[in-house]
Amino acid sequence: MPQPPGPGKPPRTPDADDLVLVGLVPLLEPYYRGAAVRDLMPEPLRGAMERHQLTPRHGAVLPQLLAAQPLTVGEIAQRLQVSLPTASELVGGLSRAGIVERGEDPANRRRVLVRLAEAYRRPLETFVARRAEPLLRALDGLTPDQRAGFVAGLTAWVREVQRS
């Protein structure tokens, strides 16, 4: 199996199998961008995002809060692979929109805890379920070994993208 290039090394040339895979990726993009995403987003979440001119970067914070909350701004930065000031800016926009709530950590008053505002929990759960539906249907059609391979490959891809 070819090794990925290290820093400063030229990328390997894709073979025919690689080109098939690389050609599939852009076919997913329309489903995960712009109007397609907005159409999947229920009110009041869509309205709040649009009124406050929040971007997909802001939206990336929200599933993290569904998975585990409350989170510190530092934990959000780590999960999203962004700087602490960027995470703070994203949380600030979401807080101004009323989508998240910030509060002191009772165990450490210098830390800020972020949680999803209860009014947005159900719309966000609906949105995440709608976006995940095609992926979950695809995974249902795989054997356990195929599913494990898919997850391993996707995890490796995310890790490489985050390193870039």
Image (tube, rainbow, N blue to C red):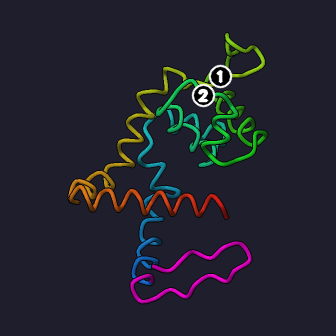
Q: Amino acid at mark 2?
A: Leu
Horizontal and vertical percent for residue 108? 72, 15
Horizontal and vertical percent for residue 132? 36, 48
Q: What is the quadrant of residue 86 in the picture?
A: top right
Q: Please give the residue where the numbered disc 2 appears in the rendered image.
A: 71
Q: What is the quadrant of residue 48 in the picture?
A: top right
Tell me what residue is drawn at x 43 percent, y 38 percent.
42
Horizontal and vertical percent for residue 2? 50, 80
Residue placed most toward the observer, 114 or 16: 16
Q: Please give the residue where the numbered disc 1 appears in the rendered image.
A: 113
Q: Which residues are magenta?
A: 1-18
Residue placed most toward the observer, 105 or 123: 105
User: In which quadrant is the C terminus drawn?
Assistant: bottom right
- Whether tag 1 and tag 2 are in contact, CB under 8 A, the answer is yes
Horizontal and vertical percent for residue 129? 36, 42
User: In which quadrant is the N terminus drawn?
Assistant: bottom left
Residue placed most toward the observer, 106 or 33: 106
